[in-house]
Amino acid sequence: MVERVLGSGGMGRVFVAISPTGRRVAVKVMREEYAADPRFQVRFAREVEAARRVSGAYTASVIDAATDGPLLWMATLFVPGPSLADRVRDGGPMPEREARVLAYELAEALRDIHRVGLVHRDLKPGNILLTDDGPRVIDFGIARVEGTDRLTHTDAWVGTPAFMAPEQFLAQAGIGPAADVFSLGGVLTYALSGAGPFGGDSPYAIAWSVVHEEPVRVPGAGPLHELIGQCLAKDPAARPTPTEILELLRESTIQPPAAASETAPQAHQAPARVPERDSAQVRNPEAARVTDPEAERAADEDAPRIPEQEVEQDAVDNPSAASVPEGGEVGDVPPPGSSEAEKPGVADGGRPRRRVALMAGALVVSLALGLVVWQPWGGRQGKEPGAGGPTASEAAPSSTGPVVVAASWTTKVPSGGGHCTSTDKVVLCESEKEAVTAYDARTGKRLWGSPRTRDNSVMLTVAPARSLVIIAEGNDAMGPGGWDQQVLRAVDLTTGRNRWKAATIMGRSAALSGTDLVVGGEFGISGRDVETGTEKWHRTKADHELAAYPLVVAGVIMSLRPGDASERPQAVLESLDPSTGAVRWSRDLPAPDVSWARQAEKSSAGVEVWGTSTPRLKEFLRFDASGAQKASHTIRSPETAADRADIAVFGPTWKVMRDWTKGRLVATDLADGKARWELPLAAADGDPYLDGKGRVYVLRANGMVICLDGGSGRELWRSEPARASTSTPSVKGMRLTVRADGVVFAHVDSGSLAAFKPPGYTGTSL
């Protein structure tokens, strides 16, 4: 008797059912179109046989199966418990004690699998179920008897790229048990850090990293970390066997406790890294990897095809988790022989990618034949809430677990929400619909909205003491001749009504000093009376754009003026008299392309100096309010895609940069350039935000806010995820703001704004 649907995917569905004897079983039923294909019947029969051969303490025993006829199905003992992907997603990375028990038991599982002559070839977090009496390894759909691997003419790879061994990508003959040991190293990395050891924006980028790059190191030291490094050795012969792993775990200081049940999954403190993937793997063996090429070697135009809508359904939009390139369209995969097919979606300095390019072409062929279903190993699509037993988030949190903060309030906001800022009473946000919308900071209630009057709108600054927010608006494609179409507005913070309005240049930034308002933008800079909007002075050039961007530093108005490569000086930092516009002092800068740096040091101005031909940060300069240069640091940027600018934030002695190529945040010391910590970051996650106390925030694609200490990388707190899946569009920019008292306001969804109080918050304004 069928009890409920457990999961579904492109090739079939999994049900929880009750056998005639009252035993609860998981029944996988394949779709009729696949059951009718003789080649698929052979493949399915092989999966059933592999699962039967290895049934034991660490697998789900096969109860019965039908491997021919119009209906293909297999019933296994139902395992009540979350997958490792569920566990880490809901409870965060494991503490080392729990991870070493997992390592010991998975080594025993691999020893049992290898003893019967099988190689699993797809060991990953979604294929490991956690129960009270130990883990269970499931899904033997692509397991092989050792030494029987063969490639087809398509050269398609088999497995989940983020956890595959180098030899699986390189098409080496005789993929052996050492490939499973490599996957074990990846699984343990994921368990301890929340992310796999190799990142990338596409399956091909991940493939390149696995074959050519060193794995991301899990913060910490000790025998377990050394073991992970040994498992992830590029050379299969250098990896330990499961038996050797067991001996190491028995004899070293990381010996597990006697009973695995003593280490039930629970929440815990993350080290310096936090989960990159935000949803758990559906326990559908067919929906999470590249389809087996051996079983499909005779595929032709008559082969069963996966409907297009199912390909899109099974491919969750999370590029770093090895899914189809963003958008889910087959046409997004570079064709074989093209220049883009020779690199994994990002620029890399011209390193050869021939092997990966061939695999990219093979994947195109497989997709065109309907043979491939991509789903990230973190995908949860199709899973019934609560299926498979309680998740870690439903258990009582550990006293040593990460501090998880629930939203104080969540409110609906207009779609297309942009930059936000806040005072102790209101939160002010831009959107596509309104220039500024005000929300009560205590409750989230919408107070008022100021409709847009032009195409472009920028919230320049807020003057709480004068109950004003300053907005600049203009129309598209405006030059100096269109200044009469641009406006500057002062809106009352309490009512949203205009206090004054002036026709002026389109501002991009502003600074306040007493009653003086200094506004700068692409066409110049001006000074105004903040109460009336009356202009006091302005500086522009008739034949050249005089871009200027003011900032207040320790009570001093500074202006950053980018230059032109043909002019000297190329760029200027200057201090201005806000009442007259007179230059009090100026400092020449070494390049024309400069911008303000986001930094935690409030008594100085941080300046970023950029390269002229690429969007890469070259140098960081720091000046105090007197114009004295306090620091100068050459920036060695991560290898960044040419069309994506670096994102960096600076503390007093460190910087944190977004590395697009390797999918991470990297913190380094400004003095010696040595790495301090790193955080795996998916392409769909937001950019880092830095507050005035040196805390770094990241908004995950699932709406989870992560707060880290910028100097050490230690996780201070995180919020509950707003969604169970990351299949929504990427987070653009930072999408959050932090008030001086540490309260965070974040766009946790395209139409939702949420407020979060930090742990230990003692304020009264939320």
Image: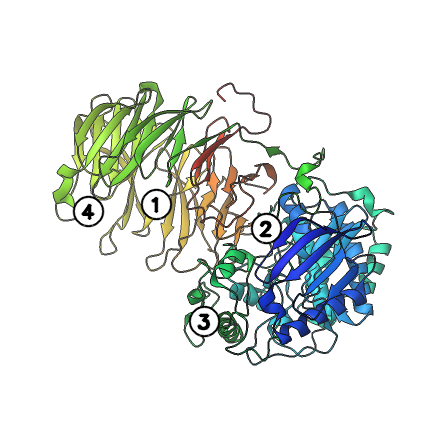
**Residue that appears at 68% across and 77% down:** 149
Query: Height in image: 387 above or below 740?
Result: below
- Which disc number belongs to residue 341? 3
Q: Which residue is mark 1?
A: 595
Q: CA distance from mark 1 to mark 4?
A: 16 Å
Q: Which residue is mark 4?
A: 545
Which callout, 2 or 4, points at the residue further toward the start of the chain? 2
Q: CA distance from mark 2 to mark 1?
A: 41 Å
Q: CA distance from mark 3 to mark 4?
A: 41 Å
Query: Height in image: 656 above or below 216?
Result: above
Q: Pointer 3: residues within 10 angstroms few (<14), some, or many (20+)? A: many
Q: Pointer 2: residues within 10 angstroms few (<14), some, or many (20+)? A: many
Q: CA distance from mark 1 to mark 3?
A: 35 Å
Query: The disc labelled 2 sits on which kind of residue?
Result: Arg
Query: The disc labelled 3 sits on which kind of residue?
Result: Ala
Q: CB atoms at circles 3 and 4 under 8 Å apart?
A: no
**Residue that appears at 55% across and 60% down:** 322
- Which disc number belongs to residue 380? 2
Task: Tell us which disc is closer to us: 3 or 4.
Answer: 3
Task: Tell us which disc is closer to us: 2 or 1.
Answer: 2
